[in-house]
Image (cartoon, rainbow, N blue to C red):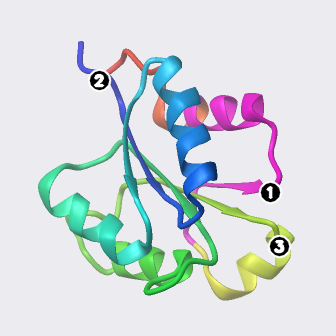
């Protein structure tokens, strides 16, 4: 069985590193990008099972990345979990079509639960 791939789009290195380690330990394959544009470039080469994207990033933020995904028929079905220190209601005013939301700071167990619910177990393909 192929491990599920999680793409993390996060400009804060420490947050991306912790998420990557926790998800990797849980059995997921993990790739990281420092902004939405880099995440879209990754998706030209490999299709993730789920994307964890920070709402506020330089170059291309989570909302712009989500709009770009939804406008590409090859990528539109990939579920996106948005992360932000802002309330979800504020994030929802700027974008829709995301599969889940994590309010920063988040508990790592909540991350694992949400990724498993949306992407499925790590070992399933």
> Is residue 70 at least partly visible in the picture?
no
Question: Quadrant of residue 99 in the image?
Answer: bottom right
Question: In the image, residue 12 lies at what x, y percent?
Answer: 60, 62
Quadrant, the C terminus:
top left
The reply to whether callout 3 and callout 2 are in contact (CB within 8 Å) is: no
Residue where numbered disc 1 is placed: 104
Q: Is residue 114 left or right of residue 103?
A: left
Dot placed on the residue nearer the N-terminal end, 3 or 2 = 3
Residue 80 point in image, percent of width and height: 50, 57
Whole-angstrom CA distance, mark 3 to mark 2, is 33 Å
Residue named by callout 2: 125
Quarter-wise, where is residue 41 in the image?
bottom left
Residue plotted at (41% across, 73% down):
36
The numbered disc on residue 86 is 3
Look at 80% across and 46% down and name the residue there. 106
Quadrant the N terminus occupies: top left
What segment is highlighted magenta in the picture? 97-116
Q: Earlier in the sequence, mark 1 or mark 3?
A: 3
How far apart are the alpha carbons under marks 1 and 2? 29 Å
Q: Is residue 75 above or below residue 4?
A: below
In the depicted structure, whether residue 82 falls above or below residue 28: below
Q: Is residue 24 above or below residue 90?
A: above
Q: Secondary structure at mark 1?
A: loop
Q: Give whichever of discs 1 and 2 has the lower sequence position.
A: 1
Q: Is residue 30 magenta?
A: no
Q: Around disc 3, counting alpha carbons within 10 Å, would you say few (fewer than 14), some (14 to 19), or many (20 or more)?
A: few
């Amino acid at each position: 069985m192929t491990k599920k791939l999680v793409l993390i789009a996060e400009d804060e290195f420490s947050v991306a590193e912790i998420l990557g380690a926790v998800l990797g330990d849980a059995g997921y394959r993990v790739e990281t990008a420092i902004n939405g544009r880099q995440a879209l470039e990754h998706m030209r080469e490999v299709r993730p099972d789920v994307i964890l994207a920070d709402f506020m990033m330089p170059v291309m933020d989570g909302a712009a990345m989500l709009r770009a995904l939804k406008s590409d028929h090859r990528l539109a079905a990939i579920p996106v979990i948005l992360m932000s220190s802002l309330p979800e209601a504020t994030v929802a005013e700027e974008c829709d079509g995301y599969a889940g939301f994590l309010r920063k700071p988040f508990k790592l167990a909540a991350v694992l639960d949400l990724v498993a619910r949306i992407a499925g177990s790590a070992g399933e393909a």
